[in-house]
Image: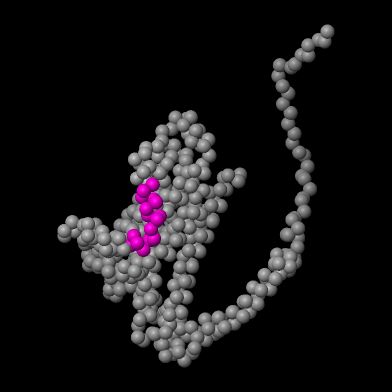
Amino acid sequence: MNAPISTPTTARTLSFVRGETLPQMPPPDDVRLSLSRRVARTYFGTPANAAITIGCILVLVWLLPPLLNWALFKATWTGNATTCREAGGACWSFIREKFLFSVFGLYPFELRWRPGLVLALFAGMVSISVQQRFWSGKLIYAWIAALAVMWGLMGGQVLGIPVPGLDPVPTRLWGGWLVTIFLAVFGAALAYPIGIVLALGRRSQRPFVRLVCVCWIEFIRGVPLISLLFIATFIVPLFMPTGVELDRLIRAQIAFIMFAAAYMAEVFRGGLQAIPKGQYEGADSIGLNYSQKMRLIVLPQALKITIPAQVNTFIGLFKDTTLVLIIGIFDFFTTLRSSLGDANWLGFATEAYVYAAAVYFVCCYAMSQYSQRLEITLNEGQRR
Protein backbone atom coordinates (compact mmCIF):
# COMPACT_ATOMS: atom_id res chain seq x y z
CA MET A 1 0.00 0.00 0.00
CA ASN A 2 1.41 3.37 -1.03
CA ALA A 3 2.13 5.90 1.68
CA PRO A 4 0.44 9.29 1.39
CA ILE A 5 2.56 12.07 -0.01
CA SER A 6 3.02 14.91 2.43
CA THR A 7 2.74 18.43 1.13
CA PRO A 8 4.42 21.46 2.70
CA THR A 9 2.16 23.81 4.56
CA THR A 10 3.73 26.85 2.92
CA ALA A 11 4.79 27.25 -0.69
CA ARG A 12 8.25 28.56 -1.54
CA THR A 13 8.24 31.84 -3.50
CA LEU A 14 10.65 31.82 -6.38
CA SER A 15 11.83 34.97 -8.18
CA PHE A 16 14.29 35.63 -10.96
CA VAL A 17 16.07 38.85 -11.84
CA ARG A 18 18.23 38.97 -14.94
CA GLY A 19 21.74 40.09 -14.14
CA GLU A 20 22.89 41.00 -17.65
CA THR A 21 21.50 43.22 -20.39
CA LEU A 22 19.91 41.55 -23.39
CA PRO A 23 21.79 42.02 -26.67
CA GLN A 24 20.53 44.89 -28.79
CA MET A 25 18.03 43.82 -31.42
CA PRO A 26 18.73 44.75 -35.04
CA PRO A 27 16.49 47.48 -36.51
CA PRO A 28 13.68 46.49 -38.88
CA ASP A 29 14.55 46.03 -42.52
CA ASP A 30 12.72 49.21 -43.54
CA VAL A 31 14.84 51.29 -41.15
CA ARG A 32 18.15 49.83 -42.35
CA LEU A 33 17.35 50.64 -45.95
CA SER A 34 18.50 53.95 -47.38
CA LEU A 35 15.93 56.60 -48.25
CA SER A 36 16.24 55.95 -51.97
CA ARG A 37 15.71 52.21 -51.54
CA ARG A 38 12.72 52.76 -49.27
CA VAL A 39 11.17 55.09 -51.86
CA ALA A 40 11.87 52.53 -54.58
CA ARG A 41 10.30 49.74 -52.53
CA THR A 42 7.23 51.85 -51.65
CA TYR A 43 6.46 53.33 -55.05
CA PHE A 44 8.07 50.89 -57.48
CA GLY A 45 8.00 47.64 -55.49
CA THR A 46 5.52 45.93 -57.81
CA PRO A 47 4.61 46.49 -61.48
CA ALA A 48 1.21 47.86 -60.46
CA ASN A 49 2.74 50.36 -58.01
CA ALA A 50 5.30 51.41 -60.59
CA ALA A 51 2.58 52.00 -63.22
CA ILE A 52 0.50 54.07 -60.80
CA THR A 53 3.52 56.11 -59.72
CA ILE A 54 4.61 56.81 -63.29
CA GLY A 55 1.06 57.77 -64.24
CA CYS A 56 0.81 60.22 -61.32
CA ILE A 57 4.16 61.75 -62.23
CA LEU A 58 3.04 62.25 -65.84
CA VAL A 59 -0.19 63.90 -64.70
CA LEU A 60 1.75 66.25 -62.41
CA VAL A 61 4.20 67.10 -65.19
CA TRP A 62 1.25 67.92 -67.41
CA LEU A 63 -0.73 69.96 -64.84
CA LEU A 64 1.82 71.64 -62.58
CA PRO A 65 3.64 73.94 -65.06
CA PRO A 66 0.51 75.75 -66.35
CA LEU A 67 -0.99 75.81 -62.85
CA LEU A 68 2.11 77.35 -61.30
CA ASN A 69 2.41 79.76 -64.22
CA TRP A 70 -1.16 80.94 -63.63
CA ALA A 71 -1.17 80.93 -59.82
CA LEU A 72 2.33 82.29 -59.12
CA PHE A 73 4.51 83.44 -61.97
CA LYS A 74 1.92 85.48 -63.89
CA ALA A 75 -0.26 86.26 -60.86
CA THR A 76 -1.13 89.81 -59.87
CA TRP A 77 -0.91 90.46 -56.15
CA THR A 78 -1.57 94.20 -56.15
CA GLY A 79 -3.35 96.45 -58.59
CA ASN A 80 -6.74 96.79 -60.21
CA ALA A 81 -8.73 94.66 -62.61
CA THR A 82 -7.03 96.16 -65.65
CA THR A 83 -3.61 95.17 -64.33
CA CYS A 84 -4.87 91.64 -63.75
CA ARG A 85 -6.22 91.30 -67.28
CA GLU A 86 -2.97 92.54 -68.77
CA ALA A 87 -0.90 90.07 -66.73
CA GLY A 88 -3.05 87.12 -67.77
CA GLY A 89 -2.52 85.15 -64.56
CA ALA A 90 -4.41 84.80 -61.33
CA CYS A 91 -5.80 88.03 -59.91
CA TRP A 92 -5.11 87.66 -56.20
CA SER A 93 -5.55 91.40 -55.80
CA PHE A 94 -9.30 90.70 -56.21
CA ILE A 95 -9.17 88.53 -53.07
CA ARG A 96 -7.17 91.23 -51.33
CA GLU A 97 -9.77 93.81 -52.28
CA LYS A 98 -12.73 91.71 -51.14
CA PHE A 99 -11.09 90.06 -48.11
CA LEU A 100 -12.70 92.25 -45.45
CA PHE A 101 -16.08 91.89 -47.16
CA SER A 102 -15.71 88.10 -47.02
CA VAL A 103 -14.98 88.37 -43.28
CA PHE A 104 -17.59 90.93 -42.16
CA GLY A 105 -20.15 91.01 -44.96
CA LEU A 106 -22.42 94.06 -44.88
CA TYR A 107 -21.64 94.87 -41.26
CA PRO A 108 -21.27 98.67 -40.85
CA PHE A 109 -17.70 99.73 -41.51
CA GLU A 110 -17.37 101.96 -38.46
CA LEU A 111 -18.54 99.12 -36.19
CA ARG A 112 -16.33 96.36 -37.56
CA TRP A 113 -14.26 96.39 -34.40
CA ARG A 114 -17.10 94.44 -32.80
CA PRO A 115 -17.01 91.42 -35.15
CA GLY A 116 -13.21 91.65 -35.06
CA LEU A 117 -13.36 91.30 -31.29
CA VAL A 118 -15.77 88.39 -31.72
CA LEU A 119 -13.29 86.61 -34.00
CA ALA A 120 -10.49 87.17 -31.48
CA LEU A 121 -12.65 85.84 -28.64
CA PHE A 122 -13.64 82.81 -30.71
CA ALA A 123 -10.01 82.06 -31.60
CA GLY A 124 -9.04 82.34 -27.93
CA MET A 125 -11.80 79.97 -26.81
CA VAL A 126 -10.84 77.43 -29.47
CA SER A 127 -7.16 77.57 -28.49
CA ILE A 128 -8.14 76.89 -24.87
CA SER A 129 -10.65 74.16 -25.70
CA VAL A 130 -8.19 72.03 -27.69
CA GLN A 131 -5.97 71.62 -24.61
CA GLN A 132 -6.99 68.73 -22.39
CA ARG A 133 -5.85 70.36 -19.16
CA PHE A 134 -8.74 72.82 -19.49
CA TRP A 135 -11.41 70.15 -19.98
CA SER A 136 -13.88 70.47 -17.15
CA GLY A 137 -17.38 71.65 -16.44
CA LYS A 138 -16.07 75.19 -16.17
CA LEU A 139 -15.15 75.15 -19.86
CA ILE A 140 -18.80 74.50 -20.78
CA TYR A 141 -19.93 77.51 -18.77
CA ALA A 142 -17.11 79.54 -20.30
CA TRP A 143 -18.36 78.69 -23.80
CA ILE A 144 -21.92 79.61 -22.86
CA ALA A 145 -20.73 82.95 -21.55
CA ALA A 146 -18.47 83.50 -24.57
CA LEU A 147 -21.25 82.75 -27.06
CA ALA A 148 -23.57 85.14 -25.22
CA VAL A 149 -20.89 87.85 -25.32
CA MET A 150 -20.25 87.22 -29.02
CA TRP A 151 -23.94 87.44 -29.84
CA GLY A 152 -24.28 90.62 -27.78
CA LEU A 153 -21.31 92.23 -29.50
CA MET A 154 -22.61 91.38 -32.94
CA GLY A 155 -26.23 92.38 -32.47
CA GLY A 156 -26.04 94.90 -29.65
CA GLN A 157 -28.60 92.92 -27.68
CA VAL A 158 -29.04 89.54 -26.01
CA LEU A 159 -32.49 87.90 -25.91
CA GLY A 160 -34.03 91.24 -26.82
CA ILE A 161 -32.24 93.09 -24.01
CA PRO A 162 -30.10 95.97 -25.36
CA VAL A 163 -26.43 96.01 -24.42
CA PRO A 164 -25.49 99.40 -22.96
CA GLY A 165 -23.18 101.39 -25.17
CA LEU A 166 -23.68 99.27 -28.30
CA ASP A 167 -25.86 100.26 -31.23
CA PRO A 168 -28.14 97.44 -32.45
CA VAL A 169 -27.15 95.85 -35.75
CA PRO A 170 -29.80 93.66 -37.44
CA THR A 171 -28.77 90.18 -38.51
CA ARG A 172 -29.53 90.99 -42.15
CA LEU A 173 -26.28 93.01 -42.10
CA TRP A 174 -24.26 90.13 -40.69
CA GLY A 175 -22.22 88.11 -43.12
CA GLY A 176 -18.97 86.47 -44.07
CA TRP A 177 -16.94 84.34 -41.74
CA LEU A 178 -18.97 85.45 -38.74
CA VAL A 179 -22.23 83.93 -39.99
CA THR A 180 -20.50 80.71 -40.98
CA ILE A 181 -18.89 80.45 -37.54
CA PHE A 182 -22.14 81.19 -35.73
CA LEU A 183 -24.14 78.66 -37.73
CA ALA A 184 -21.53 75.91 -37.40
CA VAL A 185 -20.45 76.49 -33.79
CA PHE A 186 -23.90 77.20 -32.34
CA GLY A 187 -25.32 74.33 -34.38
CA ALA A 188 -22.74 71.81 -33.19
CA ALA A 189 -22.69 73.03 -29.58
CA LEU A 190 -26.46 72.79 -29.12
CA ALA A 191 -26.90 69.69 -31.29
CA TYR A 192 -24.40 67.72 -29.20
CA PRO A 193 -26.45 67.38 -25.99
CA ILE A 194 -29.70 67.06 -27.95
CA GLY A 195 -28.17 64.23 -29.98
CA ILE A 196 -27.14 62.42 -26.79
CA VAL A 197 -30.67 62.72 -25.40
CA LEU A 198 -32.17 61.46 -28.68
CA ALA A 199 -29.76 58.52 -28.79
CA LEU A 200 -30.60 57.52 -25.23
CA GLY A 201 -34.30 58.05 -25.91
CA ARG A 202 -34.21 55.81 -28.97
CA ARG A 203 -32.81 53.01 -26.80
CA SER A 204 -35.26 53.70 -23.99
CA GLN A 205 -37.54 50.96 -22.66
CA ARG A 206 -40.46 53.38 -22.55
CA PRO A 207 -42.44 53.07 -25.81
CA PHE A 208 -43.65 56.70 -25.94
CA VAL A 209 -40.17 58.15 -25.41
CA ARG A 210 -38.68 55.78 -27.97
CA LEU A 211 -41.43 56.59 -30.51
CA VAL A 212 -40.90 60.35 -30.18
CA CYS A 213 -37.14 60.05 -30.63
CA VAL A 214 -37.45 57.65 -33.58
CA CYS A 215 -39.92 59.97 -35.33
CA TRP A 216 -37.65 62.99 -34.79
CA ILE A 217 -34.55 61.23 -36.06
CA GLU A 218 -36.11 59.51 -39.05
CA PHE A 219 -38.04 62.58 -40.19
CA ILE A 220 -35.02 64.89 -40.03
CA ARG A 221 -32.71 62.36 -41.69
CA GLY A 222 -35.32 61.65 -44.34
CA VAL A 223 -35.46 65.18 -45.75
CA PRO A 224 -32.65 67.35 -47.14
CA LEU A 225 -31.31 70.26 -45.11
CA ILE A 226 -32.51 72.74 -47.69
CA SER A 227 -36.11 71.63 -47.01
CA LEU A 228 -35.66 72.37 -43.31
CA LEU A 229 -34.26 75.80 -44.16
CA PHE A 230 -37.29 76.58 -46.34
CA ILE A 231 -39.64 75.37 -43.61
CA ALA A 232 -37.87 77.50 -41.00
CA THR A 233 -37.86 80.56 -43.26
CA PHE A 234 -41.29 80.52 -44.90
CA ILE A 235 -43.58 78.14 -42.99
CA VAL A 236 -42.67 78.65 -39.32
CA PRO A 237 -43.61 82.37 -39.40
CA LEU A 238 -47.15 81.39 -40.45
CA PHE A 239 -47.65 79.60 -37.13
CA MET A 240 -46.23 82.39 -34.98
CA PRO A 241 -48.66 84.53 -32.95
CA THR A 242 -49.55 87.92 -34.34
CA GLY A 243 -46.86 90.47 -33.57
CA VAL A 244 -44.24 87.83 -32.74
CA GLU A 245 -41.43 87.53 -35.26
CA LEU A 246 -38.42 85.25 -34.92
CA ASP A 247 -35.24 86.47 -36.54
CA ARG A 248 -34.42 84.83 -39.86
CA LEU A 249 -30.88 83.89 -38.80
CA ILE A 250 -32.22 82.32 -35.58
CA ARG A 251 -34.74 80.28 -37.59
CA ALA A 252 -31.95 79.04 -39.85
CA GLN A 253 -29.87 78.27 -36.77
CA ILE A 254 -32.69 76.16 -35.32
CA ALA A 255 -32.91 74.22 -38.59
CA PHE A 256 -29.17 73.51 -38.42
CA ILE A 257 -29.46 72.38 -34.80
CA MET A 258 -32.33 70.00 -35.57
CA PHE A 259 -30.51 68.60 -38.59
CA ALA A 260 -27.20 68.08 -36.79
CA ALA A 261 -28.87 66.62 -33.68
CA ALA A 262 -30.57 63.88 -35.69
CA TYR A 263 -27.33 62.78 -37.32
CA MET A 264 -25.36 63.05 -34.09
CA ALA A 265 -27.99 60.90 -32.38
CA GLU A 266 -27.30 58.04 -34.79
CA VAL A 267 -23.56 58.47 -34.23
CA PHE A 268 -24.01 58.24 -30.48
CA ARG A 269 -26.41 55.29 -30.80
CA GLY A 270 -23.75 53.40 -32.72
CA GLY A 271 -21.30 54.14 -29.93
CA LEU A 272 -23.75 52.94 -27.29
CA GLN A 273 -24.32 49.70 -29.16
CA ALA A 274 -20.56 49.15 -29.46
CA ILE A 275 -20.11 49.12 -25.67
CA PRO A 276 -19.84 45.51 -24.44
CA LYS A 277 -22.80 44.22 -22.46
CA GLY A 278 -20.47 43.49 -19.56
CA GLN A 279 -20.01 47.23 -19.00
CA TYR A 280 -23.73 47.66 -18.42
CA GLU A 281 -23.88 44.59 -16.20
CA GLY A 282 -20.82 45.70 -14.24
CA ALA A 283 -22.41 49.09 -13.59
CA ASP A 284 -25.62 47.39 -12.43
CA SER A 285 -23.69 45.05 -10.16
CA ILE A 286 -22.15 47.89 -8.16
CA GLY A 287 -25.54 49.53 -7.62
CA LEU A 288 -25.38 52.45 -10.05
CA ASN A 289 -28.70 53.87 -11.19
CA TYR A 290 -29.43 54.65 -14.84
CA SER A 291 -28.14 58.22 -14.71
CA GLN A 292 -24.91 57.24 -12.95
CA LYS A 293 -24.36 54.29 -15.25
CA MET A 294 -24.66 56.41 -18.37
CA ARG A 295 -22.74 59.41 -17.04
CA LEU A 296 -19.85 57.54 -15.42
CA ILE A 297 -19.48 54.28 -17.34
CA VAL A 298 -21.20 54.08 -20.71
CA LEU A 299 -21.25 57.57 -22.25
CA PRO A 300 -17.54 58.35 -21.72
CA GLN A 301 -16.62 55.20 -23.66
CA ALA A 302 -19.28 55.70 -26.34
CA LEU A 303 -18.28 59.31 -26.96
CA LYS A 304 -14.61 58.38 -27.21
CA ILE A 305 -15.03 55.63 -29.78
CA THR A 306 -17.28 57.80 -31.96
CA ILE A 307 -14.86 60.73 -32.27
CA PRO A 308 -14.21 60.11 -36.01
CA ALA A 309 -17.93 60.00 -36.79
CA GLN A 310 -18.58 63.09 -34.66
CA VAL A 311 -15.91 65.09 -36.48
CA ASN A 312 -17.18 63.83 -39.83
CA THR A 313 -20.68 65.06 -38.97
CA PHE A 314 -19.38 68.44 -37.82
CA ILE A 315 -17.30 68.87 -40.98
CA GLY A 316 -20.40 68.14 -43.04
CA LEU A 317 -22.39 70.68 -41.02
CA PHE A 318 -19.63 73.26 -41.46
CA LYS A 319 -19.72 72.88 -45.25
CA ASP A 320 -23.53 72.81 -45.34
CA THR A 321 -23.63 76.37 -44.04
CA THR A 322 -23.26 77.44 -47.67
CA LEU A 323 -26.91 76.41 -48.21
CA VAL A 324 -28.15 79.52 -46.40
CA LEU A 325 -27.51 81.26 -49.72
CA ILE A 326 -30.92 79.91 -50.77
CA ILE A 327 -32.73 81.88 -48.06
CA GLY A 328 -30.74 85.09 -48.52
CA ILE A 329 -28.31 84.90 -45.59
CA PHE A 330 -24.82 86.18 -46.38
CA ASP A 331 -22.42 83.52 -45.14
CA PHE A 332 -18.77 83.38 -46.21
CA PHE A 333 -19.44 81.70 -49.56
CA THR A 334 -22.38 83.99 -50.35
CA THR A 335 -20.30 87.11 -49.81
CA LEU A 336 -17.78 85.83 -52.34
CA ARG A 337 -20.50 85.12 -54.87
CA SER A 338 -21.93 88.57 -54.40
CA SER A 339 -18.45 90.07 -54.83
CA LEU A 340 -18.38 88.64 -58.35
CA GLY A 341 -21.18 91.04 -59.28
CA ASP A 342 -18.95 94.07 -58.77
CA ALA A 343 -18.72 95.77 -62.19
CA ASN A 344 -15.12 96.77 -61.48
CA TRP A 345 -14.03 93.19 -60.87
CA LEU A 346 -15.88 91.07 -63.41
CA GLY A 347 -14.40 87.81 -64.65
CA PHE A 348 -12.47 86.62 -61.59
CA ALA A 349 -14.75 83.83 -60.38
CA THR A 350 -11.95 81.26 -60.49
CA GLU A 351 -9.90 83.16 -57.92
CA ALA A 352 -12.93 83.53 -55.64
CA TYR A 353 -13.73 79.82 -55.74
CA VAL A 354 -10.09 78.87 -55.19
CA TYR A 355 -10.00 81.16 -52.16
CA ALA A 356 -13.23 79.67 -50.79
CA ALA A 357 -12.01 76.12 -51.38
CA ALA A 358 -8.73 76.90 -49.61
CA VAL A 359 -10.51 78.31 -46.54
CA TYR A 360 -12.88 75.36 -46.25
CA PHE A 361 -10.06 72.87 -46.82
CA VAL A 362 -7.82 74.41 -44.15
CA CYS A 363 -10.63 74.46 -41.58
CA CYS A 364 -11.79 70.90 -42.31
CA TYR A 365 -8.24 69.54 -42.46
CA ALA A 366 -7.40 71.17 -39.12
CA MET A 367 -10.47 69.57 -37.51
CA SER A 368 -9.58 66.19 -38.99
CA GLN A 369 -5.99 66.34 -37.78
CA TYR A 370 -7.02 67.41 -34.30
CA SER A 371 -9.51 64.55 -34.04
CA GLN A 372 -6.81 62.04 -35.02
CA ARG A 373 -4.43 63.44 -32.43
CA LEU A 374 -7.24 63.35 -29.84
CA GLU A 375 -7.92 59.69 -30.62
CA ILE A 376 -4.26 58.82 -30.09
CA THR A 377 -4.14 60.74 -26.81
CA LEU A 378 -7.30 59.16 -25.42
CA ASN A 379 -6.22 55.65 -26.41
CA GLU A 380 -2.73 55.84 -24.90
CA GLY A 381 -3.98 54.40 -21.61
CA GLN A 382 -5.47 51.38 -23.37
CA ARG A 383 -2.21 50.63 -25.20
CA ARG A 384 -0.36 50.51 -21.92
Q: Taking 151 as reference, is 77 left or right?
A: right
Corner quadrant of residue 228: bottom left
Residue 200: image quadrant is top left
Q: Nearer the viewer, residue 161 or 344?
A: 344
Q: Is residue 359 left or right of residue 18?
A: left
Image vertical order of residue 39 relative to residue 25, above or below: below
Q: Residue drawn at (45%, 48%), measured in percent from left and top? A: 268
Residue 301 % position (x, y) = 49, 44
Q: Decide which of 234, 376 is in the foreground and name it.
A: 234
Q: Is residue 194 visible?
A: no
Looking at the rendered structure, the number of numbered marks drawn on it comes to 0
Asked whether, in this view, residue 379 is left or right of residue 331, the answer is right
119 above or below 69?
Answer: above
Q: Magenta stretch?
A: 214-229
Placement of 327 over or under 66, stated as above or below: above
Q: Which part of the image, by quadrant, shows the N terminus?
A: top right
Q: Residue furthest right?
A: 1
Instruction: Kindly identify the residue that appears in the image at 53 percent across and 52 percent down.
Output: 375
Question: Residue furthest toward the left?
Answer: 242
Residue 19 is inside the magenta segment: no
Main structural element of the magenta stretch: helix, strand or loop? helix
